[in-house]
Image (cartoon, rainbow, N blue to C red):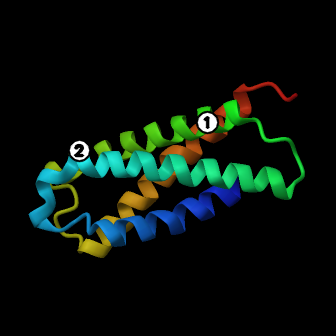
Amino acid sequence: MLIFDIIVLFFGLILLFKFLNINDKSNVNKNLLYKLYLFIYVFLLLATTDMITNLILKQPINIENTISSSINSAFIAIFAYVTYDELMYNNFFKDYSNEQNVSTLILLIILFISSVKVVQMFISPVV
């Protein structure tokens, strides 16, 4: 299920960032709006993916776990975006093109979310 979430998140984030044009220099003052869009988008995308996965596997849908997991992942995505923004502010990606910056942001978000989910899998007891 984690692999399916990562694949859907990867392609979903590509679509979101193409739509937002996130590295356009005229949109610098829209960081708060981008964070809100990212939070809502990741939440809805992962909640929908989790529900569809449970339907395909013919498992009962636990709304409480789905919402909790999706909200956690959305907050982690915001944290990854803030980390990326700080790195951009400190000219860490000054030699990168816009496509490389967006790819770095997408990979950073996926890396943060997947690493936290892997740690949660090791910590949580198997039921």
Q: Is residue 102 visible?
A: yes
How many numbered marks does the figure carry? 2
Locate residue 81 relative to residue 10 in the image: left or right: left
Does dot 1 land on a helix, a strand or a loop?
helix
Residue visible at 58% across and 47% down in the picture = 114
Q: CA distance from mark 2 to mark 1?
A: 23 Å
Q: Nearer the viewer, residue 12 or 91?
A: 12
Locate residue 92 relative to residue 18 in the image: left or right: left
Locate residue 8 relative to residue 99 in the image: left or right: right
Q: Is residue 15 above or below residue 31?
A: below
Q: Which mark is residue 67?
A: 1
Residue visible at 26% across and 63% down in the picture = 22
In the rendered image, the quadrant that contains the C terminus is: top right
Residue visible at 77% across and 55% down in the picture = 53
Q: Is residue 84 visible?
A: no
**Residue beneath disc 2:** 32
Amino acid bearing label 2: Leu
Q: Position of residue 17 (x, y in %)?
A: 35, 66
Amino acid bearing label 1: Ile
Residue visible at 64% across and 53% down in the picture = 48
Locate residue 38 relative to residue 112 in the image: left or right: left
Q: Which mark is residue 84?
A: none
Q: Position of residue 94 (x, y in %)?
A: 16, 64
Does dot 2 land on a helix, a strand or a loop?
helix
